[in-house]
Amino acid sequence: MRERKISMKKGIVSVVAAVAAVVVFGAQNDLLISFSTKGPDTYADGTTVLDNECYALVWTPNGVEGTIAADGSASEGAEIVLVAPVARSGHCPNVVYRVDAGRVETEFGQGTGSWSVYLLDTRKYSYDKEGNQVVSLAGLKSDGNVKLVNASNKVGEASVRAGVGANTSLAAAVATSAETAAALPEDVPEPKVVGIEIKGGNVFVSVENAAPYLAYDLTTGDTPDKVTEKANRPATGGDDGKVILVAPVNSTGSGFFKVISR
């Protein structure tokens, strides 16, 4: 009665952004990176990004395809240098981040790579006692990284070499759409159904071993080979690995269910 989806997650972020990424070398060759978006920046469903949504500054070495996975980790070789939960009124205000010159030389290959800015979709889903959906932001871990990523979209990029002392800038006013959603990490746990109850015309499916960085949902059907109708009531796994999924009971009071990750 469960199914773990191992393909790419379906969340998609859209951005209508005027992006400014300016990279200069300051005192003692420190690297100053500023970035912002004009907005309005949006999620896949067309809604404007929530206040305090996150933008990530990522360094990617040459020859590496930079991606951000569902658990907030970067693709091998890339590094998320800063996660800034700073969205205001549908855009990223101007952010300036200073990178020590020594760190640039030792950690970032003396500039032989690219600096990119990504808009993140870090929404998590739950339900109140009346069954109304509650959407909030997952927030950051104690190490400053993001707890979960439904999808991301690159909104600015500039390549620089440390020590040059020249200014490198990128300014764009484009409409972009993230076609690739956040990939699932290799160690995604297998969700386990531990209880099913019918209350007030709904079936409540209790699930354990759920990843706290994934949203889960139910598909339903009258027979095991026709469990295809999605409940469309996503709920994000809790920090304790538990989540309760809800779907309407059909007219016969019976049916089959599968647990999927969105």
Image (cartoon, helix red, strand yellow):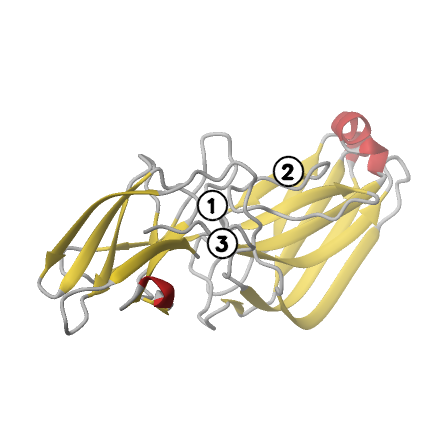
Q: Residue 152, how many percent across, how many down? A: 58, 56
Name the mark nearer the viewer: 3 or 2. 3
The answer to whether residue 210 shows anywhere in this view is yes
Tell me which amino acid carries mark 1.
Leu
Q: Where does label 3 land, which residue?
A: 150
Q: Where does label 1 land, which residue?
A: 148
Residue sitting at 82 percent across and 32 percent down? 109
Tell me which amino acid carries mark 3.
Asn
- Label 3's element? loop
Q: Residue 230, how many percent across, how many down? A: 35, 67
Residue sitting at 70 percent across and 39 percent down? 78
Q: Are marks 3 and 1 in contact (CB under 8 Å)?
A: yes
In the picture, the disc for residue 176 is none
Residue sitting at 44 percent across and 44 percent down? 213
- Give the spatial CA distance, label 3 vs label 1: 7 Å
Q: Quadrant of residue 62?
A: top right
Residue sitting at 78 percent across and 59 percent down? 170
Q: Residue 231, how many percent across, how many down? A: 31, 66
